Amino acid sequence: MEMYQFEICTNSVESCLAAQEGGAHRVELCAGIPEGGTTPSYGEITIAREMLTRTRLHVIIRPRGGDFLYSPIEVRTMLQDIEIAKNLGVDGVVFGCLTPEGDIDLPAMARLMKASQGLSVTFHRAFDVCRNPKKALEEIIKLGCNRILTSGQQPNAELGIPLLQELNEQAAGRMTLLAGCGVNESNIAKIAFETNIHEFHFSARESIKSQMEYTNEAVSMGGTVHIKEYERNVTTAQRVKSTIDALK
């Protein structure tokens, strides 16, 4: 099992601790999971860093949901968030920027990479909506990113196996492919066997009912994104462990 690395997409300190208990090597801490993940709060990062003793802490740097075309103000925000995360002692950051044409935004990425010196950097699933993945791979390698989180430009990593395999061959050890999205106990071994990828990203979450005794389900706190306010999804140590064990 030493050849494999497991990263858990976590939505809270509680999920981070479950990931650590289940045997994960690192977590990617995010807020805004229904939007695909946004930058977590200062407090969340601080407490996660304090409580994670065996598991590396990466945080997503994404100022909003939606596309990955960022304005100059948003890039400034991302630079500030990287500085804060670095000062809080995180091990890595996760980000990605695209141009209007769907290519890697090289100037924006260069600025973010410079700010991230000393940290591990993952280019996130912005990669999965870029125009030319094989060209993008070469550009991301040249930028100095450590890995790319990708589902092979498909709705989930199992469907993306053909491109994941091609990209892993193209990378040829120059950078790490991190297979993610829809990875679970039932398909992780298949993805590993067919792609020869050795790093996996998954959430291992389960739904937990709210402990509220009084509820008013006629009122929603959401706008364009609607969630069930009286349920929440939390990573569980057992699901982390069972997904890891599925590769044994």
Image (cartoon, rainbow, N blue to C red):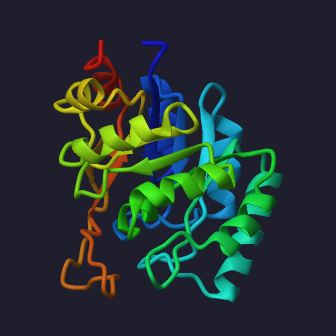
Q: Which of 138 and 117 is in front in this view?
A: 138
Q: Give the position of the N terminus as an image quadrant.
A: top left
Q: Which residue is drawn at 57% across and 50% down?
A: 122
Q: Which image quadrant is residue 169 in?
A: top left
Q: Residue at x 39, y 44 (%)?
A: 167
Q: Nearer the viewer, residue 59 or 223?
A: 59
Q: Which image quadrant is residue 241 in?
A: top left
- Pinpoint residue 66: horizontal percent, then vertical percent: 41, 79
Residue 205 drawn above or below residue 2: below
Number of marks drawn: 0
Q: Is residue 126 visible?
A: yes
- Pinpoint residue 199: horizontal percent, then vertical percent: 44, 32
Residue 74 drawn above or below residue 1: below
Q: Give the position of the C terminus as an image quadrant.
A: top left
Residue 204 is left or right of residue 38, and the answer is left
Residue 142 is left or right of residue 103, and the answer is right
Residue 39 drawn above or below residue 91: below
Residue 158 is left or right of residue 150, and the answer is left
Q: Residue at x 24, y 68 (%)?
A: 228
- Pinpoint residue 148: horizontal percent, then vertical percent: 49, 48
- Pinpoint residue 36: horizontal percent, then vertical percent: 39, 65
Q: Can residue 202 be seen in this view?
A: no
Residue 104 is left or right of residue 93, and the answer is left
